[in-house]
């Protein structure tokens, strides 16, 4: 019997945000592909899961996909996790999944945390239709995408790291100063924080603080604001 690959979502900060099904799956598969063995090791030890961890990241994805296929064809089952949240969403694994599907291997999703969906759900901004952009390119192409996003009428969801969050909000102030923005920092963690307002208002507050952590930035549809 050919094995399956399980795509297992992991917590994005609060270790309690993990499902029974995810724990059971990680206990029973033959191997777990993960970005950072130390990060996933901590999660496994919290849930008393002992299993074989195999390093799998964007650089090793293509080479390791063939090895994974061979193992699954031999009847082993595997799981893919990322450092946090849902694998393949701004994380490695898309090429692996498509390669396995091309080879008629069953890929099964175990749902759980995702920073974009969680941020949207508590933003108060319309969610019926949205454009998920993930991380903007750091240099080449960044300004071009920002110009294109000015024309995007729907809610826009961006990921940003601490290194560029002030830069991003300044850019939004330059390109779309009238668009209402919600920024969620450190979702599910003890120091979870949220900013709401126009980019020009938020940038003043951000620049006066020592900012750390991870961010989701949600840009409201054209013409929409919280009254
Ligand atoms: N696959 C993940 C998911 O399902 O959300 C996203 C991985 S991506 C490499 C990491 C980015 O997600 C961070 O830089 C940040 O923009 C966002 N993120 C992850 N955890 C977060 C959290 N607890 N609070 C806010 N943003 C978070």
Image (cartoon, rainbow, N blue to C red):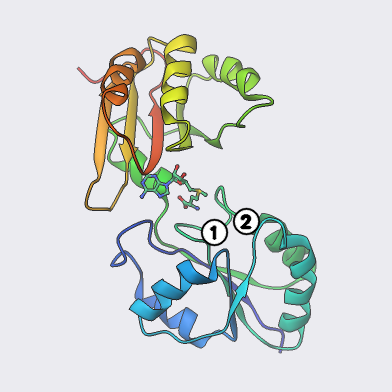
The correct choice, above or below, for 88 with respect to 161 in the image is below
Residue that label 2 marks: 92
Quarter of the rendering containing residue 178 = top left
Q: Is residue 59 left or right of residue 197?
A: right
- Residue 168 in the image: state x and y as whole percent: 47, 24
Residue that label 1 marks: 87
Q: In this view, does 129 lie to the left or right of 133?
A: left
Q: Distance between the residues labelled 1 and 2?
A: 7 Å
Out of 181 and 5, give the one closest to the viewer: 181
- Residue 202 in the image: state x and y as whole percent: 30, 20
Q: In which quarter of the image is the C terminus?
A: top left
The correct choice, above or below, for 34 with respect to 58 in the image is below
Label 1 near ligand 1 (CB < 8 Å): yes
Q: Which residue is drawn at 49% across and 19% down?
A: 153
Q: In this view, does 113 lie to the left or right of 87?
A: left
- Residue 206 in the image: state x and y as whole percent: 30, 25
* Label 1 Cα neighbours within 10 Å, binned few <14 / some 14-19 / many ≥20: many
User: Which of the two labelled residues, at mark 1 and mark 2, occupies the earlier sequence position?
Assistant: 1
Q: Is residue 217 left or right of residue 14?
A: right
| SS at badge 1 | loop
- Residue 62 in the image: state x and y as whole percent: 77, 61
Question: Outermost residue, left direction?
Answer: 227
Quarter of the rendering containing residue 2 = bottom right
Q: Which residue is drawn at 57% across and 53% down?
A: 91
């Amino acid at each position: 019997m050919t094995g399956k690959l399980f795509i297992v979502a992991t917590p994005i900060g609060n270790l309690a945000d993990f499902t029974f099904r995810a724990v059971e799956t990680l206990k029973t598969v033959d191997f777990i592909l993960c970005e950072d063995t130390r990060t996933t090791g901590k999660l496994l030890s919290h849930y008393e899961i002992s299993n074989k961890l195999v390093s799998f990241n964007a650089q090793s994805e293509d080479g390791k996909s063939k090895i994974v296929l061979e193992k699954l064809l031999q009847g082993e089952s595997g799981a893919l996790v990322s450092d946090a949240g849902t694998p393949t969403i701004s994380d490695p694994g898309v090429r692996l999944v498509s390669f396995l599907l091309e080879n008629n291997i069953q890929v099964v999703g175990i749902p759980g945390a995702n920073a974009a969906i969680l941020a949207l759900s508590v933003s108060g901004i319309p969610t019926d239709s949205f454009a998920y952009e993930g991380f903007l390119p750091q240099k080449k192409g960044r300004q071009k995408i920002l110009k294109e996003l000015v024309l995007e009428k729907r809610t826009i969801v961006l990921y940003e790291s601490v290194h560029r969050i002030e830069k991003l909000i300044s850019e939004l102030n330059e390109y779309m100063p009238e668009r209402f923005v919600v920024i969620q920092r450190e979702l599910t963690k003890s120091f979870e924080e949220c900013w709401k307002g126009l980019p020009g208002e938020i940038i003043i507050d951000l620049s006066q603080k020592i900012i750390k952590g991870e961010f989701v930035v949600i840009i409201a549809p054209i013409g929409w604001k919280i009254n």
